[in-house]
């Protein structure tokens, strides 16, 4: 029993040479990722100095847009309203109207496809700079943009959305974003899709660190996620905001605590 207990408590340790090579490989990827986003990291550092909001704790990025504009549905579905007209014209016997009726489904399909393709909002890159003293979201040119101090965040809410998985009959609520309310009444929604640009491994790295905390967990560099930034600096979501709700559509780094 004692030997079995000792075996369970045994920790498999890597040889020093293997650990060194693994650590160097991880660091090489991190350096490449940092060089790839050197401009953004430097920009965040400049803003941190300019607004005196502490050190940079993370630079995050996500994609926004790509949704279909409401007007697109009206324009794209116009051919459906023209079906009775096409049938009525074919019934008159005017030469060419029967051929038009036969070609109408193909013409309507092409119209709908092109309308929805052209009617989508263009995708854009959105950036979030997190500092020890606040944060700022860069979504398009806004010369008057200034950081939101963490000390001004009075409420942290959760935004939930329904997601479907293969084989599930009912949707599953998923935490999609955080809603931060400031003392001046401003509300800022922070999507959980924001990814730390300095982390070359992302969610896969978090998984590996959890599966092998004694090897990968001690050698792979870790970077804060958007969840950790919100929890550390803005605080935990308030009790009243934890109920799932359907959302309305719509460089030096500081040491991580």
Image (tube, grey):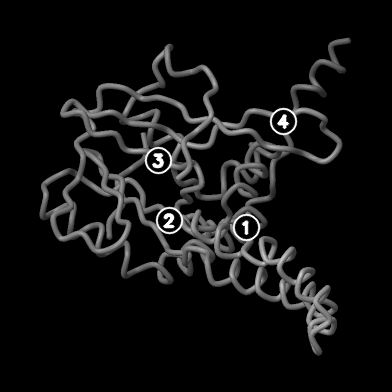
* Mark number displayed over residue 61: 2
Q: CA distance from mark 4 to mark 3?
A: 23 Å
Q: Secondary structure at mark 3?
A: strand
Identify which residue, 209 or 188, lies in the foreground.
Answer: 188
The N terminus: image quadrant = top right
Residue 134, numbered circle: none
Q: Nearer the viewer, residue 214 or 120?
A: 120
Q: Nearer the viewer, mark 2 or mark 4?
A: 4
Q: Which residue is mark 1?
A: 22
Q: In the rendered image, which quarter is residue 133 located in?
A: top left
Badge 1 marks a residue whose secondary structure is helix
- Residue 22 location in percent, x, y? 62, 57
Left or right relative to 11: residue 190? left
Tell me, yes or no, whether the two marked residues, 4 and 3, touch with CB atoms within 8 Å.
Answer: no
| Residue 3, horizontal then vertical, whole percent | 86, 17
Q: Residue at x 60, y 41 (%)?
A: 217
Image quadrant for the C terminus? top left
Q: Which mark is residue 190?
A: 3
- Counting residues from the start of the chain, the first of labels 4 and 1 encountered is 1
Determine contact: label 2, label 3, CB under 8 Å. no
Of the two numbered discs 1 and 2 in the rendering, the one whose residue sits closer to the viewer: 2
Q: Are marks 4 and 1 in contact (CB under 8 Å)?
A: no
Tell me, yes or no, whether the two marked residues, 1 and 2, touch with CB atoms within 8 Å.
no
Q: Earlier in the sequence, mark 3 or mark 1?
A: 1
- Residue holding disc 4: 171
Label 1 environment density (alpha carbons within 10 Å; few <14, some 14–19, many ≥20): some
Could you say whether the residue bearing mark 2 is in a helix, strand or loop?
strand
Q: Position of residue 10 (x, y in %)?
A: 75, 27
Comparing 121 with 165, the one in front is 121
Cα–Cα span, label 2 and label 4: 28 Å
User: Upstream in the sequence, badge 2 or badge 4?
Assistant: 2
């Amino acid at each position: 029993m004692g030997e079995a207990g000792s075996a369970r408590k045994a920790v498999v340790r890597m040889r020093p040479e293997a650990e060194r090579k693994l650590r160097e490989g991880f660091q090489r990827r991190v350096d490449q990722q940092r060089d790839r986003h050197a401009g953004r990291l430097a920009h965040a550092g400049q803003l941190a100095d300019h607004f005196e909001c502490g050190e940079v704790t993370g630079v995050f990025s996500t994609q926004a847009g790509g949704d279909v504009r409401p007007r697109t549905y009206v324009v794209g579905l116009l051919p459906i309203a023209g079906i009775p007209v096409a049938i009525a014209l074919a019934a008159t016997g005017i030469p060419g109207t029967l051929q038009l009726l036969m070609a109408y489904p193909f013409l309507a399909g092409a119209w709908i496809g092109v309308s929805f393709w052209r009617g989508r909002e263009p995708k854009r890159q959105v950036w979030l700079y997190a500092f020890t003293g606040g944060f700022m979201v860069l979504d398009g040119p806004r010369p008057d943009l200034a950081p939101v101090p963490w000390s001004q965040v009075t409420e942290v809410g959760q935004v939930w959305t329904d997601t479907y998985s293969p084989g599930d009959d009912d949707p599953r609520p998923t935490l999609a974003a955080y809603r931060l309310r400031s003392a001046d009444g401003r509300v800022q929604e922070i999507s959980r899709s924001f990814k730390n640009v300095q982390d070359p491994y992302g969610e896969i790295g978090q998984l590996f660190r959890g599966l092998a905390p004694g090897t990968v967990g001690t050698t792979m560099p870790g970077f804060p996620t958007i969840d950790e930034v919100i929890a550390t600096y803005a605080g935990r979501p308030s009790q009243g905001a934890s109920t799932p709700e359907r959302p309305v559509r719509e460089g030096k780094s500081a040491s991580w605590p």
